[in-house]
Image (spheres, grey):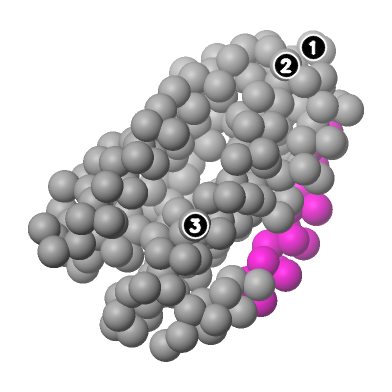
Amino acid sequence: MQTKNVNEELKELLKYSKQQIENFPWEDKQAYSAWVSQTYYFARHTTRLLALAGARTEFAAPEFHNRFLTHTTEEKGHDKLLVNDLKTLGSKMEEWPEMPGTCALYQTQYYYIEHQSPMAFFGYILGLEALAAYFGDHVNSRVEKAWGPKAAHFIRVHAEEDIGHTDEALNKIASLPAHHQTTVLQNLKQTLSYYEQMLNECKQQAKVRPSKAA
């Protein structure tokens, strides 16, 4: 498999993701609060997953080991941005339990890293960072217009940073053997599928959750 194919597959998958992102009711306070909470629940695992991937990387691949560890420092504290965003919206994390799609999103990564290969984790990295790189500005614009910049810290940071991260992930995937690229692509598809499930669950939760005063 050539990296070009991974990139082309990503672009095809993002065409569908674009519809999901644009149709999400970011202007609905309950829906956006649900998204913030669920993003917190998977984002707080990011540094742990990166550290685990780095620890499980073979000694023969120090460039990947070092990249995972460097990426860990880049993601440090991002979950706190979400706590502040939700506080601005007048809510707390403990008011929002984890949803099944959220759990599936990050829990499967522990399996991939431990039982298949730490290189598989690039599928998760690529999927989530591509969403931010391609659609972050759009989402940030809508959220800031509806709820103000103090409710959009996480989105704003990732819209700015993840363009470079996406390119870097694609370059790393380019150097992987074909069998690892196949696993990366499998995880990429799975990640975006679970992310869609999470978005749908956020919308459903917004419909049944009592609204708070603004």
Q: Is residue 54 above or below residue 2?
A: above
Q: Position of residue 64 (x, y in %)?
A: 28, 56
Q: Secondary structure at mark 1?
A: loop
According to the image, label 2 marks what residue? 150
Q: Amino acid at mark 1?
A: Ala
Q: Residue at x 67, y 41 (%)?
A: 159
In the displayed structure, does residue 191 sit left or right of residue 184?
A: right
Q: What secondary structure is found at the residue carrying circle 3?
A: helix
Q: For label 1, count other residues whose C-alpha is less than 10 Å away and answer few (under 14), some (14-19) or many (20+).
A: few
* Magenta highlight: main SS: helix
> Residue 13: x percent and y percent?
63, 72
Q: With respect to residue 205, does 122 lie above or below?
A: below
Q: Quadrant of residue 58?
A: bottom left
**Marks 3 and 1, how far apart at CA:** 43 Å
Per the rendering, the mark at residue 168 is: 3
Q: Position of residue 145 (x, y in %)?
A: 88, 28
Q: Is residue 154 visible?
A: yes
Residue at mark 1: 213
Q: Say whether residue 84 is magenta.
A: no
Measure the alpha-carbon separation of dots 2 and 1. 18 Å
- The amino acid sitting under disc 3 is Glu
Badge count = 3
| In front of the other: 126 or 175 | 175
Residue type marked 2: Lys
Dots 2 and 3: beta carbons under 8 Å? no
**What is the quadrant of the N terminus in the image?**
bottom left
Can residue 203 be seen in the rendering of this structure? Answer: no
For marks 3 and 1 on the same chain, the one whose residue lies earlier in the sequence: 3
Mark 2 against mark 3, which lies toward the viewer? 3
Region of the chain picked out in magenta, as a range: 12-27
Q: Nearer the viewer, residue 39 or 211?
A: 39
Residue shown at 66%/72% (left/top)?
11
